[in-house]
Amino acid sequence: MNAQDLERLEREFFARDTRRVARELLGSFIVRKIGRDTLIARIVETEAYRGDEPACHAYANAQRMQRGEAPRGRSAVLFDEPGTAYVYFNYGMYWLFNVVTEPAGQAGAVLIRAIEPVSGIERMREFRPRAKSDTEIGNGPGKLALALDIGAEFHGKSLLRSRELFFARPSGMRARRQIVESPRIGISQAKDLPWRFQLRDQACVSKQTRR
DNA sequence: ACGAGGATGCTCT
DNA sequence: GAGCATCCTCGTG
């Protein structure tokens, strides 16, 4: 597959309900350009996080806004323009890659939880030496950030403009219908909302299950 | 096949 | 100081 066959996802795509964006990102692609290499990966699993529910990192800031105070700290980015990257450093070791959703001023993001490598697989393997097979290159949110070399340098950056990192899909691509919904993984709040989305029968979805 | 536990550091209280 | 949107290794069966 070539990056030329794909059209970048624009602001209007992300400026919508977070769950809708999370569903429609399934089957779309992440394009990551590093030097002369173009890495392309199909999105197969996502989760929606919205400012009005307590699992969202923006929750405390959303409450603050209700009281007329300004958002602050790391999660203030979640109130920025849709299409902005929110990159979170987790468990002292792993970067997790999100894209900001909802109109500016409302907080929301979609966490990318798993990808299927499509192009530039050899380069991804260099970033993921532990992967024993191609399916293990990006079958988890920490793993895919490694495979695509996504880290702090993208936090707060607009993916509507970046040459190095953006979302794309073939023109005229229809929304996927074979989608499995389930509760989100690894959280302690709002555990029961079925806001995790996966492409059905996809080998590269994450292995994690609820505790 | 599966589960427990360790690595590791930022953010917020 | 606690908690965390994880991953990996090493036990056991």
Image: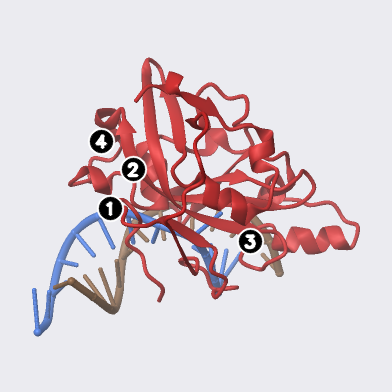
Chain colours: A red, B brown, C blue
Q: Do tags 2 and 4 sit on the same chain?
A: yes
User: Residue A54's spot in the image, x, y percent?
Assistant: 66, 68
**Circle 4 sits in a helix, a strand or a loop, which is it?**
helix
Q: Are marks 2 and 1 in contact (CB under 8 Å)?
A: yes
Which residue does the numbered mark 1 point to in the structure image?
A203
Q: Are marks 3 and 4 in contact (CB under 8 Å)?
A: no
Which residue does the numbered mark 2 point to in the structure image?
A116
Side of B2 where A160 appears, left or right: right
Amino acid found under the numbered disc labelled 1: Ala
Q: Are marks 1 and 4 in contact (CB under 8 Å)?
A: no
Tell me the distance, in whole angstroms, between the alpha carbons under discs 1 and 3.
28 Å
The chain containing the residue under callout 3 comes to A
Tell me the distance, in whole angstroms, between the alpha carbons under discs 3 and 4.
31 Å
User: Residue A157's spot in the image, x, y percent?
Assistant: 62, 32
Mark 2 or mark 4, whichever is nearer to me: 2
Amino acid found under the numbered disc labelled 4: Arg
Label 2: how many residues lie within 10 Å, few (<14), some (14-19) or many (20+)? many
